[in-house]
Image: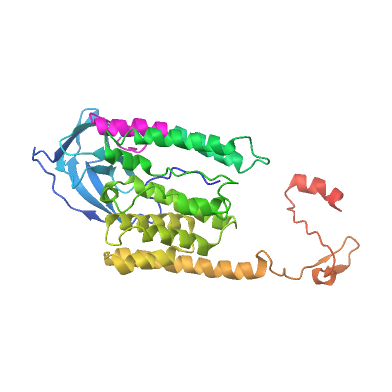
């Protein structure tokens, strides 16, 4: 059973373009303000970003001023919409922050590692998101653990279907309780929540647990909702989704073509002219770059054909496509020679009696090949038993 795995924000190729945006000093109703305090800080400025595909758009920035052993900043600006943004210094040193117009936020922590050591205060919405997200993650873990157990148990426990449904309903009821207070928060928290697979009930609907994962992970989310244009955590969930599917390819439990079928189906649920679409496609590229996935070229071409990028960024992507295509060719040759089902090369080595013997001379017989290393002490100890 695949599990959600937290992934670091924006590793891989890290193709970043900074769009300049002047800090807004207005105190109008649609503005926000952030005051920050750090211990001694190596940064000279800090920014709020909106993620737009392979780029970071600067929403607001402020200089960081050192005073003795501490550093400070004061930022004012306007956000395009209530949403989840990133604060820090892109690409690596950023963390999510939920902002809405009219709020005043206090930001503290280690400015050199904001993702791990920082906290936001003064925003009830942000605080509620952090609190409820922690609760949902714990309930999700309980649900997935039970689901994993069912997929590895025979016979199934009595009332297993009812228990699984109750655990899922408990999660949904908790999530629905946020809707009356803040529909935006509910939509953010809905990401990653999907009905779990039951090995008997769902066997006919889905081919297996991987098929269920591929078709269901975003099944409860309406990605056509414009709110997801301004939710940076969507990329984290998309990368988790794609990486788990790609791990299935590496472990020979699912084909690359099948993974692309699931990924294409997800893209098809979103209008191609939206930021949400760009962010999903960019997330594919980031995780495929990290994992040297052979599908990188297909989705890189799709991105380049539909969205303009500076020439240096296009060149960087094109070179990465060439590298991964070369890896694909090497893998194809390797699989032909040594992959599952391939005919092994003829091996001619001396027998214990000193005579050379060919592997091919043993065709039609059961042959055990035991490979061991001269430096492997347990292997050498076991050799006489194998002989």
| Residue 178, percent from left and from top | 32, 34
Q: Determine whether, in the image, residue 178 is placed left or right of residue 143.
A: left
Residues rendered magenta in the picture: 111-137
| Residue 164, percent from left and from top | 53, 37
Residue depicted at 40% across the width and 51% down the height: 238
Q: Determine whether, in the image, residue 62 is placed left or right of residue 330.
A: left
| Residue 359, percent from left and from top | 80, 68
Is 222 included in the stretch rendered in magenta? no
| Residue 171, percent from left and from top | 43, 35
Is 121 included in the stretch rendered in magenta? yes
Residue depicted at 53% across the width and 45% down the height: 197
Residue depicted at 44% across the width and 63% down the height: 296
Residue 244 against residue 46 in the figure, above or below: below
Q: Nearer the viewer, residue 171 or 119?
A: 171
Q: Determine whether, in the image, residue 379 is placed left or right of residue 104.
A: right
Colouring of the image: rainbow
Residue 37 makes an appearance in the image = no
Residue 169 against residue 247 in the figure, above or below: above
Count every numbered label the image shows and give the total: 0
Residue 1 makes an appearance in the image = yes
**Quarter of the image holding residue 300?**
bottom left
């Amino acid at each position: 059973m695949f599990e959600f795995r937290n992934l670091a924000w924006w590793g891989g190729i890290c193709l970043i373009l900074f769009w300049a945006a002047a800090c807004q000093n207005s105190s109008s109703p649609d503005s926000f303000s952030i005051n920050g305090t750090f211990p001694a800080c190596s940064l000279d400025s800090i920014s709020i970003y909106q993620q737009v595909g392979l780029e970071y758009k600067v929403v607001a920035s402020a200089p960081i001023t050192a005073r003795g052993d501490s550093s400070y900043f004061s930022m004012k600006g306007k956000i395009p919409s209530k949403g989840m943004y990133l604060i820090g210094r892109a690409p690596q040193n950023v963390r999510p922050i939920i902002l809405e117009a009219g709020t005043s936020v206090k930001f503290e922590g280690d400015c050199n590692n904001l993702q791990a050591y920082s906290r936001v205060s003064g925003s009830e919405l942000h605080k509620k998101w952090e609190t409820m997200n922690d609760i949902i993650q714990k309930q999700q873990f309980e649900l997935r653990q039970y689901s994993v157990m069912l997929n590895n148990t025979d016979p199934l426990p009595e009332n297993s279907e009812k228990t699984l449904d109750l655990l899922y309903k408990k999660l949904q009821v908790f999530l629905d309780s946020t809707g009356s207070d803040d529909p935006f928060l509910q939509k953010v928290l809905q990401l990653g929540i999907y009905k779990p697979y039951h090995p008997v009930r769902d066997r006919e609907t889905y081919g297996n647990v991987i098929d269920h994962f591929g078709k269901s992970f975003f099944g409860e989310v309406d990605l056509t909702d414009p709110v997801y244009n301004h939710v940076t955590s969507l990329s984290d969930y998309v990368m988790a989704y794609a990486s788990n599917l790609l791990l299935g390819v590496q472990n020979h439990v699912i084909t690359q073509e099948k993974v692309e079928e699931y990924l294409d189906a997800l893209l098809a649920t979103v209008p191609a002219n939206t930021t949400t679409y760009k962010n999903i496609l960019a997330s594919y590229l980031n995780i495929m770059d990290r994992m040297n996935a052979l599908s990188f070229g297909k989705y890189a071409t799709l991105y380049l054909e539909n969205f303009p990028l500076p020439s240096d960024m296009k060149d960087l992507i094109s070179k990465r496509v060439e590298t991964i295509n070369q890896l694909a060719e090497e893998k194809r040759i390797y699989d032909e020679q040594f992959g599952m089902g391939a005919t092994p090369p003829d091996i001619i080595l001396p027998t214990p009696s000193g005579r050379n013997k060919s592997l091919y001379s043993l065709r039609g017989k059961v042959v055990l090949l035991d490979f061991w290393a001269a430096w492997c002490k347990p292997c050498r100890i076991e050799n006489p038993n194998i002989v």
